[in-house]
Image: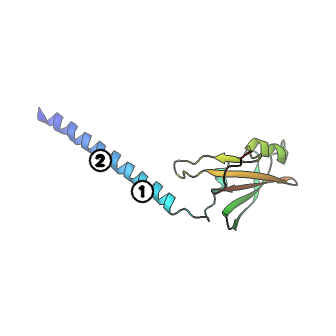
Amino acid sequence: MDEPRERGRLFSIAGVTIVAVTVLFALVYYFRSAVFATEGDVPAASAISLPEGSEVVDESVECASGGCWALLSVCPPEVMTPEELSSELGTTPQARIPGTLWDPRTITVSSRVDGPLLIVRADFWSREVTP
């Protein structure tokens, strides 16, 4: 008669322990991400959702006193102009991509047209443009 009650108690303790350890690991992960973030961090190109048919033809990283940023040279799909791609991405003048569970930092994205290409700039450090 006490065996089912004891088993239920053990399952409850195991469940609470698993939840507590998971929360502790998550807090340590986010604390580490915040403390060790540097101005040299740049978002991955895959963090920017480009329309199907777009092609990243060049990717580079540039740095200055305000931090570093990724520069992507994007060839728009055949049915789009670079200006239309910029509007599609919402980078006129700037877009903000919220962080994910794995990287909670917000990505700031802006762009400019360079001939047939759209140059997309992405970083973690820019402030939001005020109109």
Residue 121 picture location, percent across and down: 73, 56
Q: Distance between the residues labelled 2 and 1?
A: 16 Å
Residue holding disc 2: 17
According to the picture, the residue beneath numbered tag 1 turns out to be 28
Quarter of the image with the N terminus is top left
Residue 51 in picture, x, y percent from top left: 73, 43
Q: How many labels does the image show?
A: 2
Image quadrant assignment for residue 44: bottom right
59 above or below 107? below
Q: Residues within 10 Å of mark 2 (few under 14, many from 20)?
A: few
Callout 1, which amino acid?
Val
Tag 1, which secondary structure? Answer: helix
**Residue at 46% of width from left, 57% of height from top?**
31
As rendered, which of 38 and 116 lies closer to the eye?
38
Judged from this view, the residue extending furthest toward the right is: 115
Residue 117 placement: quadrant: bottom right
Q: Which residue lies at the image location 52% right of the left edge and 48% below the top edge?
A: 101
**Relative horizontal placement of residue 13, taking residue 79 as reference (left or right):** left
Kind of residue at badge 2: Thr
**Kind of element beneath mark 2:** helix
- As drawn, 35 above or below 54: below
**Which residue reaches farthest top?**
1
Earlier-in-chain disc, 2 versus 1: 2
